[in-house]
Every structure is written in structure tokens, then in C-alpha cells.
């Protein structure tokens, strides 16, 4: 997969995760002040860590290191989903926005799992 594209910035999952991080950043800046450095900070950090992990592992000569980074990105996606669940339960997020984030992050999870399968195929030499 890395031979077919020139940069992690070309990966659709990376682009989508960056877009979602910017949306979450905007959302958390409108959160109650007391949540700015609590839940808001956790949401901003985990939503930014997902694409950052993809960038970190990109083009590493050891495919296992990139696999680890993509797995961490998937973990950050799940963490962000947890924070969104809490934000929704605390009524900081309307249902339509929550549902949209849920759909988008579920899709990113599927995309990351597909990337992991591709990396595994490269490791094993299968197609």
C-alpha cells in the first residue's frame, strides 16, 4: 500500500480523521469552561492522536512498527468515541451531531482495519 501512494496525507482515513479532529476541536471550544481542560482536552488529544499515529508510522522500513502505529490509531478512535459518548450524555452534543460523529468514527475504524489487513498482506506476501 505504501508503494502505491507517496504520503500518509493521501490516505483517505488520514484525511477523514484530520477533518474529524478539527470538528471536535471546534466543538470542545464551545464546551462549558470547566470542561475545557477536562473532557474537552481529552477529546482534542485523542482525536488528534489518531491521525498523528498514522503519520508517525508511515514509511517505516519495519512494517511491524507501522502496524503498531495503525493499531494505536484505532485505539485512539475508540477512546474518542468514548469521550463523545460522555459528551452526549452530559448534553454537550445534540443527537444529530453525536450520531454523525458515531457514523464517521465507525467508518474510520473500518478503514483502519482495512489498512491493517493490507499491511498484514504485505508482511505475508499475499494479495
Image (cartoon, rainbow, N blue to C red):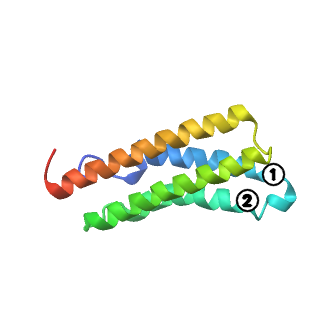
* Mark 1 Cα shell of 10 Å, populated few (<14), some (14-19), many (≥20): some
- In the rendering, at what x and y percent does residue 125 appear? 13, 53
- In the rendering, at what x and y percent does residue 64 appear? 28, 65
Q: Is residue 8 shown left or right of residue 80?
A: left
Q: In the image, which disc is placed on residue 21? A: none
Asked whether residue 1 is in view, the answer is no
* Mark 2 Cα shell of 10 Å, populated few (<14), some (14-19), many (≥20): some
Q: Is residue 119 shown left or right of residue 22?
A: left
Measured along the vertical axis of the image, is residue 10 above or below residue 61? above
Question: Residue at image x 24%, y 54%?
Answer: 120
Mark 2 or mark 1: whose residue is earlier in sequence: 1
Tell me the element at label 2. helix
User: How many dots with numbers?
Assistant: 2
Measured along the vertical axis of the image, is residue 20 above or below residue 62? above
Q: Separation of disc 2 and disc 1 at Cα?
A: 9 Å
Q: Are marks 2 and 1 in contact (CB under 8 Å)?
A: yes
- In the rendering, at what x and y percent does residue 6 appear? 31, 51
**Looking at this rendering, what residue extends furthest in the front direction?**
89
Question: Residue at image x 55%, y 36%?
Answer: 103
Q: Mark 1 points at which residue?
A: 31
- In the rendering, at what x and y percent does residue 9 appear? 42, 50
Specify the quadrant of the image occupied by residue 19. Answer: top right
Tell me the element at label 1. loop
Question: Residue at image x 16%, y 44%?
Answer: 127
**Looking at this rendering, what residue extends furthest in the top direction?**
96
Asked whether residue 37 is in view, the answer is yes
Q: In the image, which disc is placed on residue 39? A: 2
Q: Is residue 48 shown left or right of residue 30?
A: left
Tell us which disc is closer to us: 2 or 1.
2
Q: Is residue 93 shown left or right of residue 102?
A: right
Question: Residue at image x 46%, y 46%?
Answer: 109
Amino acid at each position: 500500500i505504501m508503494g502505491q501512494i507517496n504520503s500518509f496525507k493521501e490516505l483517505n482515513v488520514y484525511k477523514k480523521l484530520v477533518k474529524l479532529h478539527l470538528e471536535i476541536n471546534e466543538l470542545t471550544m464551545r464546551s462549558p469552561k470547566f470542561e475545557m481542560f477536562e473532557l474537552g482536552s481529552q477529546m482534542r488529544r485523542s482525536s488528534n492522536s489518531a491521525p498523528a499515529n498514522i503519520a508517525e508510522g508511515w514509511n517505516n522500513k519495519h512494517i511491524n512498527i507501522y502496524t503498531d502505529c495503525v493499531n494505536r490509531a484505532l485505539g485512539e478512535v475508540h477512546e474518542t468515541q468514548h469521550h463523545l459518548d460522555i459528551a452526549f450524555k452530559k448534553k454537550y452534543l445534540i443527537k444529530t451531531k453525536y450520531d454523525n460523529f458515531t457514523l464517521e468514527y465507525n467508518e474510520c475504524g473500518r478503514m483502519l482495519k482495512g489498512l491493517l489487513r493490507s499491511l498484514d498482506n504485505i508482511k505475508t506476501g499475499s494479495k
